Image (tube, rainbow, N blue to C red):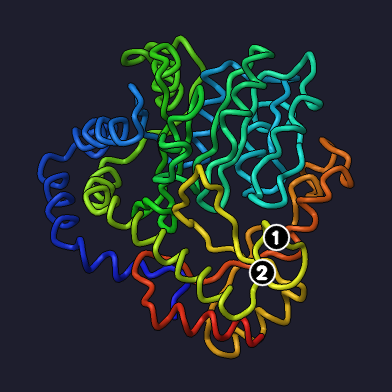
Amino acid sequence: MQFIDLNAQQQRIAADVHARMEAVLAHGRYILGPEVAELEARLADYVGVRHCVGVSSGTDALLVALMALDIGPGDEVVTTPFTFVATAEVIALLGAVPKFVDIDPITYNIEPTRIEAAIGPKTRAVMPVSLYGQCADMDAINAIAERHGLPVIEDAAQSFGATYKGRRSGGLSTIGCTSFFPSKPLGAYGDGGACFTDDEQLATRMRQAMNHGQDKRYNHPRLGINGRLDTLQAAVLLAKLAIFPDEVERRAAVGARYTELLRARGAGSLKDTADGLLTPHVEAHNTSVFAQYTLQADDRDSVIAMLKAQDIPTAVHYPIPLNRQGAYARFCCPDCTPNADRAAARVLSLPMHPYLSAEDAERVADAVTSA
């Protein structure tokens, strides 16, 4: 059993991928070719925003967004410690300070009621993460940020395709950023990412920042990076985007099937209990793309070992909160995020992809509850 089955997807779209890649090889515009502009237009339409800027990775999407907001040395950005390192990494790389706020123990996303206490005179932005495929409480976060005159950057690397109160992730705040890493809900055959906004000036700044800060050839009004999306990756993403709505539905069905099977076998819900084997909770106003299907277990290591013995792969996203990592511990009291600490000690993710069969889901559920 595979944790993520990219081969099943590849077989479904092979002919379209090959045709699109051959078209790129024929015209030879490997950097900022026409497929990039086509993909940006389609992604902007899908998310429901005016502007999409394709970039070289999800990490660079976050970096470019911060650069467009002129965030730099001494500035502070409020964010979560329970996420992949890129979220805090880009803040620190610009000389700014990540201000870590604890998570909601039910959704794993940043707890909005804790944000205001972290905002100070040096705060320049709020960066929530929509973790595991479910959006953070963006209305509450946006309202707090608006009171303090702050922009909000949604790190939507794991939630592209999810909805929050009927609106799509990536289009819920000042800037949305996502990743097209191969294992993401919409993944390329290499690195890639995108930024989304309705603000034309920010879109222009991000487009400049990802292309060496230039507004025209050899003219550089801003600092920038080499953060362009490859044309070949854009071609692959165009082929994948054609089947993406169907895959989003399949992901939701697999997630619902897991939850039904596990609860029928005695697992609890994160919403209802704090111990035992706990299934994820999706808020009523949200849909999730289940970038990961993540459980909590009292004795995670034993569960992982027993599943491994049955050739069922698992992963832990994430075992150490960022405020307990050597590069970031100086930015936050290590004991100020108990919810993140508890989650980090208990979470494990099961095989999850749109092509997971009902039989495989039942096999996994039986193995998990047995363990």
Q: Residue at x 43, y 45 (%)?
A: 162
Numbered mark located on residue 272 in the image: 1
Amino acid type at image mark 1: Asp
Crowding near the residue tagged with mark 1, few <14, some 14–19, many ≥20 C-alpha atoms within 10 Å: few
Q: Quarter-wise, where is residue 166 in the image?
A: top left
Alpha carbons under labels 1 and 2: distance apart: 7 Å
At which x and y percent is residue 98? 73, 32
Is 17 situated left or right of 132 in this image?
left
**Residue type indicated by callout 2:** Gly
Residue 273 picture location, percent across and down: 74, 63
Q: Which residue is mark 2?
A: 268
- Quadrant of residue 51 within the rendered picture: top left
Q: Nearer the viewer, residue 296 or 224?
A: 296
Quadrant of the image for the N terminus?
bottom left
For image coordinates 69% across by 48% down, the residue present is: 82
Q: Position of residue 65 (x, y in %)?
A: 52, 26
Kind of element beneath mark 1: loop
The secondary element bearing badge 2 is classed as strand
Residue nearer the viewer, 339 or 260: 260
Q: Which labelled disc corresponds to residue 329? A: none
Give above or below for 345 relative to 332: below
Residue at point 60% right, 90% down? Answer: 309
- The quarter in which the C terminus is drawn is bottom right
Give coordinates of residue 367: x percent, y percent. Answer: 57, 85
Quarter of the rendering containing residue 117: top right
Q: Are marks 1 and 2 in contact (CB under 8 Å)?
A: yes
10 Å neighbourhood of mark 2: few (<14), some, or many (≥20)? many
| Rendered position, 37 above or below 240 | above
The relative height of residue 157 versus residue 223 in the rendered view (above or below) is below
Residue at point 36%, 77% (across, down): 357
